[in-house]
Amino acid sequence: MSNVDELARRARLRVVELAARKAIHLGPALSLIDVLAALYTRILRRDPARPDWPDRDLLVLSKGHGAYGLYAVLAELGVLTTDLNELPGHPSDGIPGIEAATGALGHGLSLASGLALGARLAGKDRRVYVITGDGELDEGSNWEAAQFAAHHRLGNLVAVVDRNRLQQEGDTEEVCALEPLADKWRAFGWRVGESDGHDITAIADAVTALEAGDGPAVLIAHTTKGRGVPFAEGDPAWHMGELDAAQRRIAVAALTASA
């Protein structure tokens, strides 16, 4: 297991311990941890000693329901030292490492597009990354933002879709079908890549390849909701929940065995 895989495993343990203390969005937090680990350790330009470095790359977590996954990764990186239990269920301003408050789903891509255009207008060599949920693509101004980013040829913008194929109400294709998802992005003028969303090297390689082209790009990262906790994997009932003592033991044992 690589150091980054181990970081992701420990982050999942943090999420499980939180879910044993209160009801949280467990499934969404667990599905995107490998994507976050890949971006923060292999892709984003950042200076751990200067978290507010003005030329750092930015990451916007549009799928605010994944907040505890983001907090857990930031804690593993040493950015967050707060008791995660005290933090809100959606990313909010004022939390170290959080670049934008999100949680009114469907608007992070618009926000990231504005940040990317702003960076270009300011002459900054900065990239902006945004993670959206797949179910979230049903909401808000996502496709308006996709059109905007393509029109302005925002080559410093990369979106990652956490494609776990589940949303709170069930299968994304039954609630409001997204497929053919890659073709839809291409139709809006985006370059598209796909990868296993739990293979950190594959994620980093795919994003690096996309960055070499012109205009905005999107990676469709195929993930499993609830990844790492056997009884929660692929079960929309665990979109949000609290673990009882027996469930916590099963979850911790599974994650410990994967070390």
Image (tube, helix red, strand yellow):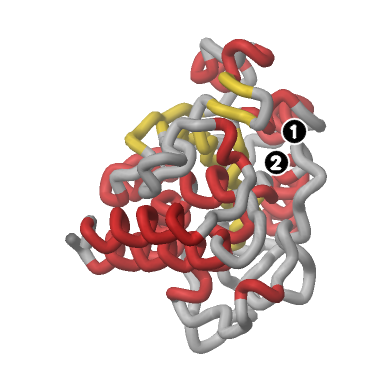
Name the kind of residue labelled 2 in the image.
Answer: Leu
Please name whichever residue, 166 or 255, is drawn nearer the observer in this view of the structure.
255
Q: Could one spot residue 208 in this view of the protein?
A: no
Image quarter hosting the N terminus: bottom left
Picture residue at 60% right of the left edge, 40% below the top? 239
Q: Which mark is residue 50?
A: none
Q: Are marks 2 and 1 in contact (CB under 8 Å)?
A: yes
Whole-angstrom CA distance, mark 2 to mark 1, is 6 Å
| Residue that carries the numbered disc 2 in the rendered image | 109
Name the kind of residue labelled 1 in the image.
Answer: Ala
Picture residue at 36% right of the left edge, 54% below the top? 250
Of the residues under marks 2 and 1, which one precedes in the sequence? 2
Instruction: Give residue 40's position: percent from left, percent from top.
Output: 45, 63
Instruction: Give residue 61's position: percent from left, percent from top.
Output: 64, 52
Q: How busy is the neighbourhood of tag 1: few (under 14 within 10 Å), some, or many (20 plus)?
A: many
Left or right of 254? Residue 91 is right
Q: What is the number of callouts on the image?
A: 2
Q: Which mark is residue 145?
A: 1
Picture residue at 29% right of the left edge, 45% below the top? 199
Q: How busy is the neighbourhood of tag 2: few (under 14 within 10 Å), some, or many (20 plus)?
A: many
